[in-house]
Image (spheres, helix red, strand yellow):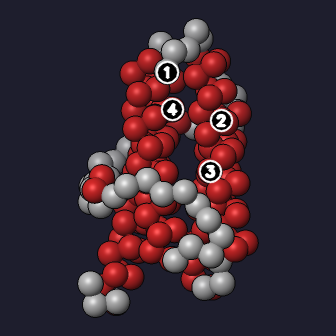
């Protein structure tokens, strides 16, 4: 990825977050399992927060300085999975795999963008987004593990 300015970086990140909102919203609308529907709706709301963060960066509304950074352990489940394309009616485990891979890619993206940022404020914003995506990935990997354990795997 080549960017000519921080504005281009933020615009790219915004596009990716908006795609994530659409993705999780579509999953929630197509899912028949109530718990899964609610989970995907929660993820859509989380991604909307990321959109607002990027849109409002630099305003007093964003309190990155108050954000509590913490290490999120990586279960690395998605690291061993292949990419799949979403298709309505996919099995729940395939949807989870797809979502895990998306979060993995978002985490990598924000790590790369934090390295390209030219100010501490932008570096911290991207690090914050890294942590948020790492949390999402961990949640999905845990749901996946729990589901598979229930299935006897």
> Is any part of residue 41 visible from this angle?
no
For the point 39% across and 82% down, which residue is it?
A: 147
Residue under pointer 2: 14
Which element carries disc 2, helix, strand or loop? helix
Left or right, 33 with reference to 97: right
Pinpoint residue 84: horizontal percent, then vertical percent: 48, 57
Of 93 and 125, nearer the camera is 93
Residue at (64%, 18%) from the top-left corner? 7
Mark with earlier residue (1, 4): 1
Nearer to us: label 3 or label 1:
1
Residue 90 percent across, percent down from the top left:
56, 73
Q: CA distance from mark 4 to mark 2?
A: 13 Å
How would you rate the neighbour count of disc 4 (Cα within 10 Å): few for under 14, some for 14-19, many for 20 or more?
many
x 73%, y 72%: residue: 29
Q: Say which mark, if any, is on residue 20.
A: 3
SS at mark 1 in the image: loop
Chain-order first, disc 3 or disc 1: 1
Q: Which residue was labeled with disc 4?
A: 125
Residue 149 in the image: x percent, y percent?
Answer: 30, 85
Q: Give the left or right position of residue 61, taking residue 93 as reference.
A: right
Residue with the mark numbered 1: 1
Residue 110 visible (yes or no): yes
Q: Nearer the viewer, residue 148 or 62?
A: 148
């Amino acid at each position: 990825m080549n960017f000519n300015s921080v504005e281009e970086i933020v615009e790219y990140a915004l596009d990716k977050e908006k795609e994530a909102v659409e993705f999780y919203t579509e999953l929630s609308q197509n899912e028949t399992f109530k718990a899964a529907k609610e989970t995907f709706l929660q993820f859509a709301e989380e991604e909307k927060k990321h959109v607002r963060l990027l849109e409002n960066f630099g305003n007093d509304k964003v309190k990155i300085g108050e954000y509590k950074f913490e290490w999120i352990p990586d279960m690395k489940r998605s690291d061993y999975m292949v990419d799949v394309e979403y298709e309505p009616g996919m099995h729940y485990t395939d949807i989870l795999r797809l979502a895990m891979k998306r979060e993995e890619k978002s985490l990598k993206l924000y790590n790369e963008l934090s390295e390209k940022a030219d100010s501490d404020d932008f570096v911290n914003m991207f690090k914050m987004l890294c942590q948020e995506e790492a949390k999402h990935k961990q949640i999905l990997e845990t749901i996946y593990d729990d589901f598979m354990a229930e299935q006897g795997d």
